[in-house]
Amino acid sequence: MSQAATDDIVVLEHRGEIAVVRLNRPDRLNAFTNEMCHRLVAIFDETDADDSVRAVVLTGTGRAFCAGADLAAGGDTFVLGDDPDTGGAPPDTGGQVALRIYRSLKPVIAAINGPAAGVGVTMTLPADIRIASDTAKFGFVFARRGLVPEACSTWFLPRVVGISTAVEWTVGGRMVPAAEALERGLVRELVPAGQVLDRALEIARDLVTGKAPVSVALTRQLMWRMLGAPEPEIAHRAESIGIHVRGTSGDVREGVDAFLSKREPEFPDTVSDGLPDLFR
């Protein structure tokens, strides 16, 4: 596949300070491929490095968000060679995307515009907020294909919807309607299909407007990483470092002055200048 064709399967658009990342294989219901994996990882590298991007919205082109893995190869779709570096199992490509979204320095909102199955739903689990079309359906259908869950979903899904629902959905393998996904906490809200992207952009702007980019990045890291912390003392230590480091920053001086002056802040610090290590 040519570089231009690879670039076209996931498109990066800019809506002001919000980057829109669009899965773009509508003729295949945005089915996931290795090329799509590599393109998504590259795009999140790009959005992290671009200080003009404050948040990322992930969506799909056409009537589906993502139908899951492209099954064009039939029964050999999941026949993979050994990892050339280790001789063992190669890294799951869905997991590579999920981990890259998890490590994003910008908030991520998934605008699920239509059906999402397999990796099409599991890749959205590291997003900070998911909204969906009221006609969307979600399929954790791995057991129906003879597979097991992927994209780190055995870590993410129980934390999003609870262990009981996670087991029910993944073992049962049925398509979950939008109303149930909302009730069980997979998505934050449902909107008509034509309004999903606009609503996601609105949420993204509300998240970041008037907030310090470095503080947003560090807060996102703290929240996600503390999910796996065995005790609150670990959070206390990381937060103490953060308060100490950020307390002397230009951002704090500007934030406090803007508050006292009753004006909008203009924070000087940028994510591209580097983030302090709160987890040492």
Image (tube, rainbow, N blue to C red):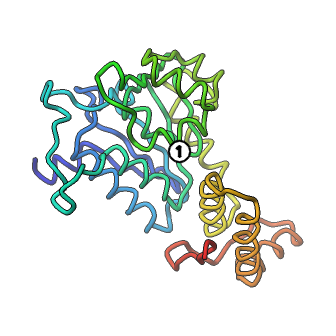
> Which residue is pictured at 35% across the width and 32% down the height?
61
Residue at point 60% right, 37% down? 160
Q: What element carries label 1?
A: loop
Residue 212 image offset from top left, x and y in percent = 67, 67
Residue at 64% x, 51% y is 227
**Residue 145 place in picture, x, y as percent:** 29, 22
Would residue 159 appear left or right of 155 to someone viewing this image? right
Observer-nearest of 72 and 213: 72
Give the residue furthest to the bottom: 248
Task: Between residue 240 and residue 273, name the one nearer to us.
Answer: 240
Which residue extends farthest right?
A: 260
Q: Is residue 277 left or right of residue 4?
A: right
Q: Is residue 258 above or below residue 161?
A: below
Q: In which quarter of the image is the C terminus?
A: bottom right
Amino acid, disc 1: Ala
Q: Image quarter for residue 26?
A: top left
Q: Locate residue 3, reporting x and y percent.
A: 15, 54
Closer to the camera in the image, 265 or 45: 45
Question: How would you rate the neighbour count of disc 1 (Cα within 10 Å): few for under 14, some for 14-19, many for 20 or more?
Answer: many
Task: Establish if 265 lies above or below 103.
Answer: below
- Residue 138 in picture, x, y percent from top left: 46, 23
Residue 116: quarter of image: top left
Q: How many labels does the image show?
A: 1
Which residue sits at x=43%, y=32%? Answer: 121
The residue wearing badge 1 is 127
